Amino acid sequence: MGLFGNFKKAEVRSLENPNAPVSAENFLHIMGWGDVQSSARVTVNIDNALGVHAVWAAINFISGTLASLPLEVYRGNERVTDGIGALLNRAINSTASSFQWRKYSYEQVLTGGRSVALILRNGRGDVTDLVPLDLDLLVLFTCPTLRKAKHSK
């Protein structure tokens, strides 16, 4: 093992904080789901945070910058310019451009942590449209034969 062998051992830590057990009443708040009460007795949520100009400006700048970057789709080593490649570069559907969809998606990721889009296909299985879904209206459930999602409250 050598003279310095004891210093190379990996440190093992528990992911769980023993001072905040998983069964705590505020588990959802610890995990970032729901409103959080600050030490100044102000409720902090996404809507209130976006009311702070610096937070809104940062999210707007980051999402707009990332959405404006070129997006290229590859199948193996070949660039895809039709089908899904064209859809992601021009317009995802008849009402939204690729930039608008990507900016919205990045805003959702930066504020809520994720973004979801419904993929619409034609009879041959080709992707024809992407429809952004509102996470507040999305309900996921599992059935025995396949996984389905329902978009309503």
Image (tube, helix red, strand yellow):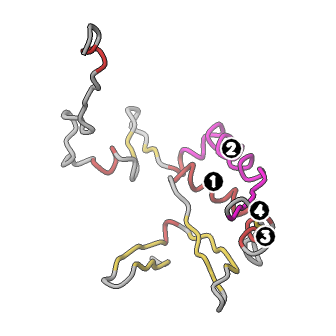
Side (left or right) of 106 relative to 67: left
Mark 2–mark 1 CB contact (< 8 Å) = yes
* Residue depicted at 22% across the width and 48% down the height: 25
- Give the Cα separation between the discs numbered 2 and 4: 27 Å
Check contact, mark 3 vs mark 2: CB within 8 A.
no
Q: Quadrant location of the N terminus?
A: top left
Q: Looking at the rendered structure, which numbered label has been put on residue 106? A: 1
Q: Are marks 4 and 3 in contact (CB under 8 Å)?
A: no
Tell me whether circle 2 and circle 4 mark residues in contact (CB < 8 Å).
no
What's the residue at 23%, 35% (across, down)? 14
Percent across and percent down for residue 13 are 25, 31
- Residue at 57%, 48% (x, y): give it: 110
Amino acid beneath label 4: Arg
**Extent of the magenta region:** 49-75
Identified by mark 1, the residue type is: Tyr
Residue highlighted by disc 3: 86
For residue 62, the mark is 2
Alpha carbon distance from label 1 to label 3: 20 Å
150 is higher (above) or lower (below) than 79: below
Of 86 and 100, which appears nearest the observer?
A: 86
Q: Report the residue marked by disc 4.
A: 79
